[in-house]
Image: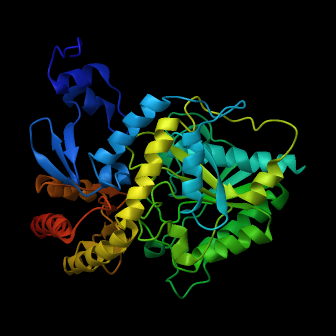
Amino acid sequence: MSKFKLGRGWIEEDKLHMLHGGVPLDDFAENGTPLILDSAFGIRVKDIHGREYIDALGGAVCTSCGYGRKELAETAKEQMMKLSYAESWSGITSTAAIEYAHALAEFTPQGLDRFFFVNSGSEANEAAYKIARYYWATKGYEEKNKIISRNLGYHGLNMVSMWATGMPRFHEKIGAPDPDIVNITECYCYHCPFGKDYPGCNLECAEALVEAIEKLGKDSVAAFVAEPIYGVSGTIYPPPEYFPKIQEICKNYDVLFILDEVMTGFGRTGKNFACEHWNVTPDMLCMSKGMISSALPIAGVAFTEGIFQGMLCSGPFPHLHTCGAHPVSCAVAKRNLELIIEENLVENSAVMGKYMLDELTKLQEYPFIGQVQGMGLFLGFEMVQDQKTRETFKNKEEKKLTNAILEEGVIVRPGGSRIQIAPPLIVTKDDVDDILAAIKKAVANFKP
Protein backbone atom coordinates (compact mmCIF):
# COMPACT_ATOMS: atom_id res chain seq x y z
CA MET A 1 0.00 0.00 0.00
CA SER A 2 1.27 3.47 -0.91
CA LYS A 3 2.42 5.72 1.92
CA PHE A 4 1.33 8.77 -0.08
CA LYS A 5 -2.16 9.74 1.06
CA LEU A 6 -4.29 12.48 -0.47
CA GLY A 7 -4.85 15.18 2.12
CA ARG A 8 -7.72 16.74 0.19
CA GLY A 9 -10.26 15.65 -2.38
CA TRP A 10 -9.38 14.91 -6.01
CA ILE A 11 -10.43 18.33 -7.27
CA GLU A 12 -8.47 20.25 -4.64
CA GLU A 13 -5.34 18.11 -5.10
CA ASP A 14 -5.61 18.63 -8.87
CA LYS A 15 -5.86 22.40 -8.42
CA LEU A 16 -2.96 22.39 -5.94
CA HIS A 17 -0.40 20.41 -7.92
CA MET A 18 -1.25 20.16 -11.63
CA LEU A 19 -0.85 22.27 -14.74
CA HIS A 20 -3.05 21.24 -17.68
CA GLY A 21 -2.77 22.41 -21.27
CA GLY A 22 -5.73 23.46 -23.38
CA VAL A 23 -7.84 24.93 -20.57
CA PRO A 24 -8.17 28.54 -19.34
CA LEU A 25 -5.79 28.66 -16.39
CA ASP A 26 -7.80 31.16 -14.36
CA ASP A 27 -10.87 28.94 -14.61
CA PHE A 28 -8.81 25.86 -13.69
CA ALA A 29 -7.25 27.62 -10.69
CA GLU A 30 -10.71 28.44 -9.36
CA ASN A 31 -12.79 25.42 -10.36
CA GLY A 32 -10.38 22.60 -11.19
CA THR A 33 -10.85 20.08 -14.00
CA PRO A 34 -14.52 19.49 -14.94
CA LEU A 35 -14.14 15.75 -15.62
CA ILE A 36 -11.72 13.60 -13.62
CA LEU A 37 -11.71 9.96 -14.69
CA ASP A 38 -10.96 7.11 -12.31
CA SER A 39 -11.48 3.87 -14.25
CA ALA A 40 -12.43 2.49 -17.65
CA PHE A 41 -13.17 -0.70 -19.52
CA GLY A 42 -14.01 -1.33 -23.16
CA ILE A 43 -15.49 1.91 -24.53
CA ARG A 44 -16.76 3.21 -21.19
CA VAL A 45 -15.08 5.41 -18.60
CA LYS A 46 -16.09 6.27 -15.05
CA ASP A 47 -15.47 9.52 -13.19
CA ILE A 48 -14.62 10.11 -9.52
CA HIS A 49 -18.33 10.40 -8.69
CA GLY A 50 -19.08 6.98 -10.16
CA ARG A 51 -20.88 8.24 -13.27
CA GLU A 52 -20.24 6.22 -16.41
CA TYR A 53 -19.79 7.65 -19.90
CA ILE A 54 -19.37 6.19 -23.36
CA ASP A 55 -16.09 7.54 -24.68
CA ALA A 56 -17.04 8.34 -28.27
CA LEU A 57 -13.75 10.14 -28.73
CA GLY A 58 -11.54 7.17 -27.89
CA GLY A 59 -9.51 9.23 -25.41
CA ALA A 60 -7.66 11.64 -27.68
CA VAL A 61 -8.63 9.55 -30.74
CA CYS A 62 -6.22 6.89 -29.53
CA THR A 63 -7.76 4.05 -27.48
CA SER A 64 -8.41 1.99 -30.60
CA CYS A 65 -8.49 -1.43 -28.91
CA GLY A 66 -10.46 -0.06 -25.98
CA TYR A 67 -9.68 0.40 -22.30
CA GLY A 68 -8.50 -2.23 -19.86
CA ARG A 69 -7.11 -4.72 -22.36
CA LYS A 70 -5.77 -7.61 -20.31
CA GLU A 71 -3.62 -8.72 -23.25
CA LEU A 72 -1.71 -5.43 -23.26
CA ALA A 73 -1.25 -5.39 -19.48
CA GLU A 74 0.07 -8.95 -19.44
CA THR A 75 2.46 -8.21 -22.30
CA ALA A 76 3.79 -5.16 -20.44
CA LYS A 77 4.37 -7.20 -17.29
CA GLU A 78 6.13 -10.00 -19.18
CA GLN A 79 8.42 -7.59 -21.01
CA MET A 80 9.21 -5.62 -17.85
CA MET A 81 10.33 -8.80 -16.16
CA LYS A 82 12.34 -9.85 -19.21
CA LEU A 83 13.96 -6.53 -20.19
CA SER A 84 12.50 -3.38 -18.67
CA TYR A 85 14.80 -0.96 -20.48
CA ALA A 86 17.30 -0.75 -23.29
CA GLU A 87 18.37 2.30 -25.22
CA SER A 88 18.21 2.15 -28.99
CA TRP A 89 21.25 4.21 -29.92
CA SER A 90 25.06 4.20 -29.60
CA GLY A 91 25.29 0.59 -30.68
CA ILE A 92 22.54 -0.92 -28.50
CA THR A 93 18.95 -1.93 -29.18
CA SER A 94 16.52 -4.63 -28.01
CA THR A 95 14.92 -7.75 -29.43
CA ALA A 96 11.51 -6.25 -28.61
CA ALA A 97 12.19 -3.24 -30.85
CA ILE A 98 13.38 -5.44 -33.71
CA GLU A 99 10.37 -7.76 -33.42
CA TYR A 100 7.97 -4.83 -33.49
CA ALA A 101 9.66 -3.23 -36.49
CA HIS A 102 9.38 -6.53 -38.37
CA ALA A 103 5.65 -6.83 -37.59
CA LEU A 104 4.95 -3.19 -38.37
CA ALA A 105 6.61 -3.44 -41.79
CA GLU A 106 3.89 -5.92 -42.79
CA PHE A 107 1.14 -3.43 -41.85
CA THR A 108 2.39 -0.09 -43.15
CA PRO A 109 1.97 0.93 -46.81
CA GLN A 110 4.33 -0.90 -49.15
CA GLY A 111 7.75 0.70 -49.23
CA LEU A 112 7.50 2.31 -45.80
CA ASP A 113 9.47 -0.32 -43.92
CA ARG A 114 12.18 1.62 -42.08
CA PHE A 115 11.28 2.99 -38.66
CA PHE A 116 12.53 5.48 -36.09
CA PHE A 117 10.69 5.07 -32.78
CA VAL A 118 10.05 7.93 -30.36
CA ASN A 119 7.47 8.67 -27.64
CA SER A 120 4.76 11.00 -28.98
CA GLY A 121 3.23 12.34 -32.15
CA SER A 122 5.00 15.66 -31.64
CA GLU A 123 8.33 13.84 -31.38
CA ALA A 124 7.53 11.82 -34.50
CA ASN A 125 6.98 15.03 -36.45
CA GLU A 126 10.18 16.57 -35.11
CA ALA A 127 12.09 13.42 -36.07
CA ALA A 128 10.60 13.42 -39.57
CA TYR A 129 11.66 17.03 -40.16
CA LYS A 130 15.14 16.24 -38.91
CA ILE A 131 15.39 13.13 -41.11
CA ALA A 132 14.35 15.24 -44.11
CA ARG A 133 16.99 17.89 -43.43
CA TYR A 134 19.67 15.30 -42.67
CA TYR A 135 18.83 13.41 -45.86
CA TRP A 136 19.24 16.47 -48.05
CA ALA A 137 22.36 17.68 -46.25
CA THR A 138 23.98 14.26 -46.65
CA LYS A 139 23.28 14.46 -50.38
CA GLY A 140 25.00 17.83 -50.50
CA TYR A 141 21.96 20.13 -50.32
CA GLU A 142 22.46 21.77 -46.93
CA GLU A 143 20.32 24.78 -47.85
CA LYS A 144 17.33 22.53 -48.52
CA ASN A 145 15.92 22.82 -45.00
CA LYS A 146 12.53 24.56 -45.07
CA ILE A 147 9.38 22.70 -44.08
CA ILE A 148 6.02 23.62 -45.63
CA SER A 149 2.80 22.80 -43.77
CA ARG A 150 -0.80 23.99 -43.96
CA ASN A 151 -3.11 26.35 -42.15
CA LEU A 152 -5.41 24.43 -39.77
CA GLY A 153 -2.97 21.51 -39.63
CA TYR A 154 -1.90 20.06 -36.30
CA HIS A 155 1.52 18.42 -35.95
CA GLY A 156 2.24 18.65 -32.24
CA LEU A 157 3.50 21.31 -29.88
CA ASN A 158 7.25 20.86 -29.59
CA MET A 159 9.14 23.95 -30.69
CA VAL A 160 9.44 23.01 -34.38
CA SER A 161 6.26 20.98 -34.77
CA MET A 162 4.38 23.81 -33.05
CA TRP A 163 5.20 26.19 -35.91
CA ALA A 164 4.25 23.52 -38.44
CA THR A 165 0.90 23.47 -36.64
CA GLY A 166 -1.13 26.05 -38.53
CA MET A 167 -3.33 27.07 -35.62
CA PRO A 168 -2.39 30.46 -34.10
CA ARG A 169 -3.98 29.70 -30.72
CA PHE A 170 -1.12 27.29 -30.06
CA HIS A 171 1.49 29.98 -30.75
CA GLU A 172 0.39 32.57 -28.18
CA LYS A 173 3.13 33.96 -25.90
CA ILE A 174 5.69 31.39 -27.11
CA GLY A 175 8.01 33.63 -29.10
CA ALA A 176 8.90 34.47 -32.68
CA PRO A 177 7.92 32.08 -35.50
CA ASP A 178 10.49 29.70 -36.98
CA PRO A 179 11.51 31.27 -40.32
CA ASP A 180 12.16 27.83 -41.82
CA ILE A 181 8.54 26.71 -41.30
CA VAL A 182 6.03 28.05 -43.83
CA ASN A 183 2.24 27.52 -43.74
CA ILE A 184 0.18 27.49 -46.94
CA THR A 185 -3.57 27.88 -47.45
CA GLU A 186 -5.77 25.16 -46.03
CA CYS A 187 -7.81 22.59 -47.95
CA TYR A 188 -11.36 23.10 -46.65
CA CYS A 189 -13.96 22.73 -49.40
CA TYR A 190 -16.94 23.59 -47.18
CA HIS A 191 -15.36 26.99 -46.48
CA CYS A 192 -13.07 27.30 -49.49
CA PRO A 193 -10.51 30.06 -48.86
CA PHE A 194 -10.43 30.66 -52.63
CA GLY A 195 -14.20 31.13 -52.88
CA LYS A 196 -14.60 28.09 -55.14
CA ASP A 197 -17.09 25.23 -55.12
CA TYR A 198 -15.75 21.70 -55.51
CA PRO A 199 -15.70 20.06 -58.04
CA GLY A 200 -15.88 23.24 -60.10
CA CYS A 201 -12.36 24.32 -59.13
CA ASN A 202 -8.76 23.74 -60.16
CA LEU A 203 -7.59 22.49 -56.77
CA GLU A 204 -6.21 25.90 -55.96
CA CYS A 205 -5.49 24.61 -52.45
CA ALA A 206 -3.01 22.13 -53.94
CA GLU A 207 -1.59 24.70 -56.35
CA ALA A 208 -0.79 26.82 -53.28
CA LEU A 209 2.04 24.35 -52.64
CA VAL A 210 3.50 25.07 -56.08
CA GLU A 211 3.37 28.80 -55.40
CA ALA A 212 5.08 28.40 -52.03
CA ILE A 213 7.87 26.19 -53.41
CA GLU A 214 8.54 28.55 -56.31
CA LYS A 215 8.52 31.57 -54.02
CA LEU A 216 10.92 29.98 -51.53
CA GLY A 217 13.00 28.28 -54.21
CA LYS A 218 12.90 24.50 -54.70
CA ASP A 219 16.51 24.24 -53.55
CA SER A 220 15.49 25.51 -50.11
CA VAL A 221 12.47 23.26 -49.42
CA ALA A 222 13.14 19.95 -47.67
CA ALA A 223 9.62 18.63 -47.14
CA PHE A 224 5.90 19.21 -47.16
CA VAL A 225 3.87 17.84 -44.23
CA ALA A 226 0.11 17.41 -43.90
CA GLU A 227 -2.52 15.44 -42.05
CA PRO A 228 -4.46 13.32 -44.54
CA ILE A 229 -7.60 14.46 -42.71
CA TYR A 230 -7.55 17.51 -40.46
CA GLY A 231 -7.94 16.26 -36.90
CA VAL A 232 -7.75 18.87 -34.16
CA SER A 233 -9.35 21.41 -36.51
CA GLY A 234 -12.42 19.24 -36.82
CA THR A 235 -12.31 16.07 -38.95
CA ILE A 236 -12.16 17.89 -42.29
CA TYR A 237 -11.74 15.72 -45.38
CA PRO A 238 -10.00 16.66 -48.64
CA PRO A 239 -11.44 16.02 -52.11
CA PRO A 240 -10.15 12.69 -53.50
CA GLU A 241 -7.88 14.35 -56.07
CA TYR A 242 -6.07 16.52 -53.53
CA PHE A 243 -3.35 14.23 -52.20
CA PRO A 244 -2.54 12.57 -55.54
CA LYS A 245 -1.95 16.11 -56.81
CA ILE A 246 0.16 16.98 -53.76
CA GLN A 247 2.28 13.86 -54.26
CA GLU A 248 2.83 14.77 -57.91
CA ILE A 249 3.91 18.30 -56.96
CA CYS A 250 6.37 17.01 -54.36
CA LYS A 251 7.92 14.62 -56.87
CA ASN A 252 8.19 17.30 -59.55
CA TYR A 253 9.98 19.69 -57.20
CA ASP A 254 12.17 17.18 -55.30
CA VAL A 255 10.38 17.87 -52.03
CA LEU A 256 9.88 15.04 -49.54
CA PHE A 257 6.23 14.25 -48.84
CA ILE A 258 5.40 13.61 -45.16
CA LEU A 259 1.96 12.49 -44.01
CA ASP A 260 1.11 12.92 -40.35
CA GLU A 261 -1.07 9.88 -39.60
CA VAL A 262 -0.74 10.18 -35.83
CA MET A 263 -4.52 10.44 -35.54
CA THR A 264 -5.65 8.59 -38.67
CA GLY A 265 -3.43 5.50 -38.66
CA PHE A 266 -4.00 1.92 -37.55
CA GLY A 267 -7.52 1.46 -38.88
CA ARG A 268 -9.08 4.69 -37.69
CA THR A 269 -10.52 5.51 -41.14
CA GLY A 270 -11.37 1.97 -42.21
CA LYS A 271 -8.00 1.40 -43.89
CA ASN A 272 -4.68 0.55 -42.26
CA PHE A 273 -3.66 4.15 -42.98
CA ALA A 274 -5.74 6.98 -44.42
CA CYS A 275 -3.40 7.56 -47.37
CA GLU A 276 -4.61 4.23 -48.78
CA HIS A 277 -8.00 5.80 -49.57
CA TRP A 278 -6.33 7.82 -52.33
CA ASN A 279 -3.63 5.35 -53.37
CA VAL A 280 -0.80 7.65 -52.33
CA THR A 281 2.33 6.63 -50.45
CA PRO A 282 4.37 9.37 -48.79
CA ASP A 283 8.13 9.39 -48.36
CA MET A 284 7.59 9.48 -44.60
CA LEU A 285 4.64 8.70 -42.36
CA CYS A 286 4.28 9.81 -38.72
CA MET A 287 2.37 7.54 -36.35
CA SER A 288 1.32 7.22 -32.70
CA LYS A 289 -2.02 7.00 -30.80
CA GLY A 290 -3.67 3.87 -32.27
CA MET A 291 -0.20 2.39 -32.62
CA ILE A 292 -0.51 1.19 -29.01
CA SER A 293 -4.04 2.37 -28.12
CA SER A 294 -2.10 4.90 -26.01
CA ALA A 295 -1.66 2.29 -23.27
CA LEU A 296 1.98 3.45 -23.11
CA PRO A 297 3.92 6.20 -24.87
CA ILE A 298 5.27 5.26 -28.30
CA ALA A 299 5.34 6.90 -31.71
CA GLY A 300 7.37 6.57 -34.85
CA VAL A 301 8.35 7.65 -38.31
CA ALA A 302 8.06 5.16 -41.16
CA PHE A 303 10.16 5.99 -44.21
CA THR A 304 11.47 4.49 -47.41
CA GLU A 305 14.65 2.55 -48.01
CA GLY A 306 15.60 5.27 -50.47
CA ILE A 307 15.66 7.86 -47.70
CA PHE A 308 17.70 5.54 -45.49
CA GLN A 309 20.24 4.94 -48.25
CA GLY A 310 20.42 8.68 -48.87
CA MET A 311 21.27 9.27 -45.20
CA LEU A 312 24.24 6.90 -45.19
CA CYS A 313 27.50 8.62 -44.37
CA SER A 314 30.40 8.13 -41.98
CA GLY A 315 28.76 9.86 -39.01
CA PRO A 316 25.83 8.92 -36.74
CA PHE A 317 22.32 10.29 -37.16
CA PRO A 318 22.30 13.04 -34.49
CA HIS A 319 18.90 12.34 -32.97
CA LEU A 320 18.01 10.06 -30.06
CA HIS A 321 15.75 9.71 -27.03
CA THR A 322 16.36 8.01 -23.69
CA CYS A 323 13.09 6.11 -24.04
CA GLY A 324 12.92 5.88 -27.83
CA ALA A 325 12.12 2.32 -28.99
CA HIS A 326 11.51 1.41 -25.34
CA PRO A 327 11.30 -2.40 -25.16
CA VAL A 328 8.14 -2.44 -23.05
CA SER A 329 6.35 -0.02 -25.36
CA CYS A 330 7.52 -1.95 -28.42
CA ALA A 331 6.30 -5.26 -27.00
CA VAL A 332 2.91 -3.80 -26.10
CA ALA A 333 2.61 -2.04 -29.48
CA LYS A 334 3.26 -5.35 -31.22
CA ARG A 335 0.51 -7.03 -29.18
CA ASN A 336 -1.80 -4.10 -29.93
CA LEU A 337 -1.14 -4.58 -33.65
CA GLU A 338 -1.91 -8.27 -33.30
CA LEU A 339 -5.25 -7.42 -31.66
CA ILE A 340 -6.14 -5.03 -34.48
CA ILE A 341 -5.53 -7.85 -36.97
CA GLU A 342 -7.01 -10.73 -34.93
CA GLU A 343 -10.22 -8.84 -34.14
CA ASN A 344 -10.63 -7.38 -37.66
CA LEU A 345 -10.76 -3.87 -36.23
CA VAL A 346 -9.89 -2.16 -39.51
CA GLU A 347 -12.89 -3.81 -41.14
CA ASN A 348 -15.07 -3.07 -38.12
CA SER A 349 -14.08 0.57 -38.35
CA ALA A 350 -15.17 0.68 -41.99
CA VAL A 351 -18.53 -1.03 -41.38
CA MET A 352 -19.48 0.74 -38.14
CA GLY A 353 -18.23 4.04 -39.52
CA LYS A 354 -20.41 3.78 -42.62
CA TYR A 355 -23.45 3.05 -40.47
CA MET A 356 -22.66 5.94 -38.15
CA LEU A 357 -22.09 8.33 -41.06
CA ASP A 358 -25.44 7.44 -42.63
CA GLU A 359 -27.22 8.08 -39.34
CA LEU A 360 -25.37 11.31 -38.54
CA THR A 361 -26.21 12.67 -41.99
CA LYS A 362 -29.88 12.61 -40.96
CA LEU A 363 -29.07 15.35 -38.45
CA GLN A 364 -29.05 17.80 -41.35
CA GLU A 365 -32.81 18.08 -40.89
CA TYR A 366 -31.89 20.55 -38.15
CA PRO A 367 -31.03 23.98 -39.59
CA PHE A 368 -27.89 24.37 -37.47
CA ILE A 369 -26.25 21.15 -38.70
CA GLY A 370 -24.12 21.62 -41.82
CA GLN A 371 -21.67 19.28 -43.49
CA VAL A 372 -21.29 15.74 -42.12
CA GLN A 373 -18.13 13.83 -43.07
CA GLY A 374 -16.48 10.57 -42.13
CA MET A 375 -14.40 7.61 -43.17
CA GLY A 376 -14.35 4.66 -40.83
CA LEU A 377 -14.70 5.72 -37.21
CA PHE A 378 -13.34 9.22 -37.78
CA LEU A 379 -16.37 11.45 -38.17
CA GLY A 380 -17.54 14.98 -37.65
CA PHE A 381 -20.39 17.35 -38.33
CA GLU A 382 -20.34 21.12 -38.65
CA MET A 383 -22.53 23.59 -36.82
CA VAL A 384 -23.75 26.54 -38.87
CA GLN A 385 -26.05 29.50 -38.48
CA ASP A 386 -27.36 28.98 -42.00
CA GLN A 387 -27.04 25.85 -44.14
CA LYS A 388 -27.08 27.83 -47.39
CA THR A 389 -24.49 30.47 -46.50
CA ARG A 390 -22.55 28.02 -44.29
CA GLU A 391 -21.91 30.84 -41.82
CA THR A 392 -20.60 29.45 -38.56
CA PHE A 393 -21.50 30.48 -35.04
CA LYS A 394 -19.39 33.05 -33.22
CA ASN A 395 -20.38 32.17 -29.64
CA LYS A 396 -18.97 28.66 -29.14
CA GLU A 397 -22.18 26.77 -29.86
CA GLU A 398 -20.01 23.71 -30.59
CA LYS A 399 -18.84 23.66 -26.98
CA LYS A 400 -22.41 24.03 -25.73
CA LEU A 401 -23.60 21.10 -27.83
CA THR A 402 -20.62 19.03 -26.71
CA ASN A 403 -21.62 19.66 -23.10
CA ALA A 404 -25.22 18.73 -23.89
CA ILE A 405 -24.05 15.43 -25.38
CA LEU A 406 -21.90 14.87 -22.29
CA GLU A 407 -24.99 15.30 -20.13
CA GLU A 408 -26.48 12.42 -22.12
CA GLY A 409 -23.50 10.30 -21.09
CA VAL A 410 -21.34 10.45 -24.21
CA ILE A 411 -17.95 12.12 -24.64
CA VAL A 412 -17.26 13.90 -27.94
CA ARG A 413 -15.11 16.94 -28.74
CA PRO A 414 -15.49 20.30 -30.48
CA GLY A 415 -12.89 21.05 -33.14
CA GLY A 416 -13.18 24.37 -34.91
CA SER A 417 -16.85 24.67 -35.82
CA ARG A 418 -17.27 20.88 -35.84
CA ILE A 419 -18.15 18.13 -33.40
CA GLN A 420 -15.68 15.25 -33.62
CA ILE A 421 -16.65 11.61 -33.05
CA ALA A 422 -14.02 8.84 -32.98
CA PRO A 423 -14.90 5.92 -30.68
CA PRO A 424 -12.64 2.92 -30.10
CA LEU A 425 -12.50 0.57 -33.06
CA ILE A 426 -14.02 -2.23 -30.98
CA VAL A 427 -17.51 -0.66 -30.98
CA THR A 428 -20.48 -2.87 -31.76
CA LYS A 429 -23.69 -1.80 -33.49
CA ASP A 430 -25.37 -1.60 -30.08
CA ASP A 431 -22.58 0.71 -28.89
CA VAL A 432 -22.97 2.89 -31.96
CA ASP A 433 -26.74 3.03 -31.46
CA ASP A 434 -26.19 4.20 -27.87
CA ILE A 435 -23.82 6.93 -29.08
CA LEU A 436 -26.22 8.01 -31.82
CA ALA A 437 -29.18 8.08 -29.44
CA ALA A 438 -27.36 10.46 -27.10
CA ILE A 439 -26.24 12.74 -29.94
CA LYS A 440 -29.68 12.79 -31.56
CA LYS A 441 -31.39 13.60 -28.26
CA ALA A 442 -28.95 16.42 -27.49
CA VAL A 443 -29.31 17.86 -31.00
CA ALA A 444 -33.11 17.62 -30.91
CA ASN A 445 -33.24 19.56 -27.64
CA PHE A 446 -30.53 22.08 -28.55
CA LYS A 447 -31.42 25.74 -28.98
CA PRO A 448 -28.57 27.74 -30.60
| In the foreground, 197 or 290 | 290
Q: Position of residue 280 (x, y in %)?
A: 61, 73
Q: Position of residue 420 (x, y in %)?
A: 32, 61
Farthest residue, direction top: 3
Farthest residue, direction bottom: 200
Q: Is residue 165 left or right of residue 220?
A: left
Quadrant occupied by the C terminus: bottom left
Q: Is residue 362 left or right of residue 153?
A: left
| In the foreground, 112 or 207 | 112
* Residue 185 quadrant: bottom right
Q: Position of residue 322 (x, y in %)?
A: 58, 28
Total labels: the figure holds: 0
Quadrant occupied by the N terminus: top left
Identity of the residue drawn at 9% across and 66% down = 445
| In the foreground, 192 or 335 | 335
* Residue 113 quadrant: bottom right
Identity of the residue drawn at 15% across and 69% down = 440
Residue 134 seen from this side: yes
* Residue 110 quadrant: bottom right
Q: Is residue 150 left or right of residue 48?
A: right
Q: Position of residue 180 (x, y in %)?
A: 71, 46
* Position above or below: 86 against 41: above
* Position above or below: 116 against 429: above
Q: Is residue 138 left or right of residue 411?
A: right
* Position above or below: 40 against 109: above
Identity of the residue drawn at 22% across and 56% down = 402
Q: How is the image coloured?
A: rainbow
| In the foreground, 73 or 390 | 73
